[in-house]
Amino acid sequence: MKFNIKILLSFVGLSLVSLLFFGYIVWHGMTELSDYITVINARLGELARQNNIDKHRYEAEKHLIETAASEVDIQVLHVKKMVASAIPFILLMVLCASALITRKATRSIKSIIEGIKSVGRGNLQYRMSITVGDEFEELAHAYNKMADELQAYDLKLKEQTQQLINTNDDMVREILVRMEKEDIENKRNAERLRFRDALLYLSRRDLSEPDAAFKKITLLVSETIAVARVSIWLYDKDKTAILCRCLYKAEQDAYESGFILKAVDYPRYFEALKNNRIIVASDARTDPRTSEFTEGYLKPLNIVSMMDAGINQKGEVAGVICCEQTETQIVWTMEAQEFVSSVSDMISLVLESAQRTQTERMLIQQSKLAAMGEMLSMIAHQWRQPLSSISTIAADMQVAIAIGQLDMKDFNDSLDKINEQSQYLSNTINDFKNFFSPTRKKETVMPDYIIEHALKIIGKSIEYKTIEVRREYSYKTAILSYPNELIQVLLNILKNAQDILLERKVTSPVIVIGGYDDDVNTFIEVSDNAGGVDENLIDKIFEPYFTTREDTGGTGLGLYMSKTIVEKHCKGSFTVKNQKDGVCFIIKLPVENKENEDV
């Protein structure tokens, strides 16, 4: 309403101003006309006087002019009165015209305002219908065109907005799916990392002894994949049953073993074990491969889920590692399956290592037995001198008794000598007996103790063959190792040196035993002057069953077993090199090695 009043007042004010301006113009024009006639009269009088115009004529013309002027004044006055009387009528007409114009303008303006308000309220359906044929109609057409464009734009905007909403919803869903996948992948990566660390931990442990290794493995698997029971089962020789070598129970933190499962009682499980790398049974009681265990095994122990991975050796199933979950069912992830499969491969390596160790033990004993004849020859050399001494003392005692010249002092002295020689013989027997008894645990010994005990066994044999033995060693630190096995290594080296020196008929044969130690390692070096080893063969002398003395009964096991003992059991190194006059064997041993392992 305020806007309409302003428009009305504007039109009225404009009309009044126009009317007043018109009246002023008319009034002012009449006044100027009257003044102009007066000026003319005055000017005529002046001209008359100047030109001596006839006074009577002048008066007559003057009268006429004055009459005309009077008439003009009367007409001017009449016009002024007419103008004054016409002003209200004109004003009324102006007001009426203004009202009509204002009404039309107000109606158009109201329509425009309503349209604007409709647009403001978001109603783009409103259209103006002004047909006055003026600027308002053009404005209405412009508004309607604008409304059409806005409506089309609004529809397009709504479509685009809906598309954006749909796109946004799709993006949100995609982001959620991606986040879920990333979360799953992060969990899987964390699981993989945990499993990798567990495998690395196992790989760095001492798994040489199977029973101790099985305990470490079952405990680690139980903790890593969070299961209640982990066990390792191995087939018997006939593959008709599997024997539990180790069962770890997390709840009691205890180990058990000795259980037997027979193939005849659980045929489907044993068949599945042959045909599957891994058996994954989230519901072990309904899975056809494991359901046979339900009544006699699963229910009594409250086992719900099982995951069994076969242990393969030489292309055949040798056993199984079994993971069992109690109380609640578990879904085994692919990462868990891969982890347990990797553990089963490590168990295969443990079994292979145990078999190799057993084979090596047998080869060591075989090597010792193969050297039995040589040992007997060494014993004969060791015993020859003391037996000869005992025989000589006994003969002297018999002669003294026969001639009656044996007194108690000589008798007691002879008995002491016989006892001394007998004790030497007994010590020799003990030395050989200890040598043939494998060392089970490491002992702390000085390196020169090992050298001297080796020479006690073979020294007399070497001296009997007129071979000089030089001792050029000096040690300050004891070592933790297997003395009897190291004695066997030295015996092999010394026996080979003796044989090659005799075979090549070396003039002035010499065997040098040297050695020294530092803060880290101890070295024992045995060299000879027999001319060395053929460079084409020197890299092969540690291979099993390789020998250059087949004619003289060489087995090719001595140096191979010596390298095995030094490097695998004693954690050292055993190497060979040619030097000026012959060959030198070098044994390097760690000063301290605290790993207690069986040989």
Image (spheres, rainbow, N blue to C red):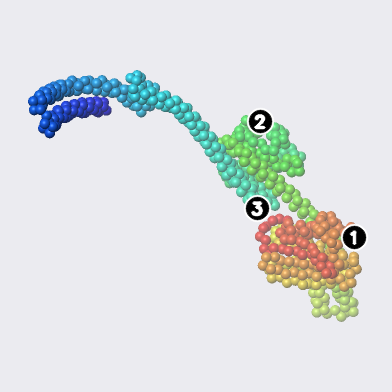
Q: Which disc number belongs to residue 288?
A: 2
Sequence-first tag of 3 and 2: 3
Is residue 351 found left or right of 368 in the rendered image?
Answer: left
Q: Is residue 380 above or below residue 87?
A: below
Q: Is residue 222 visible?
A: no
Task: Return the mark for residue 552.
Answer: 1
The amino acid type, in three-letter code, at marker 3 is Arg
What residue is shown at x 31% (from left), y 22% (from top)?
108
Residue 29, horizontal then vertical, whole percent: 18, 28
Q: Secondary structure at mark 2?
A: loop
Residue nearest the observer in this picture, 404 or 256: 256
Q: Nearer the viewer, residue 113 or 320?
A: 113
Q: Quadrant of residue 21?
A: top left
- Of the two numbered discs 1 and 2 on the same chain, state the one appearing first in sequence: 2
Residue under label 3, please give it. 204
Distance from Cα at disc 1 to Cα at disc 3: 44 Å
Mark 1 and mark 2: Cα distance apart in space: 64 Å
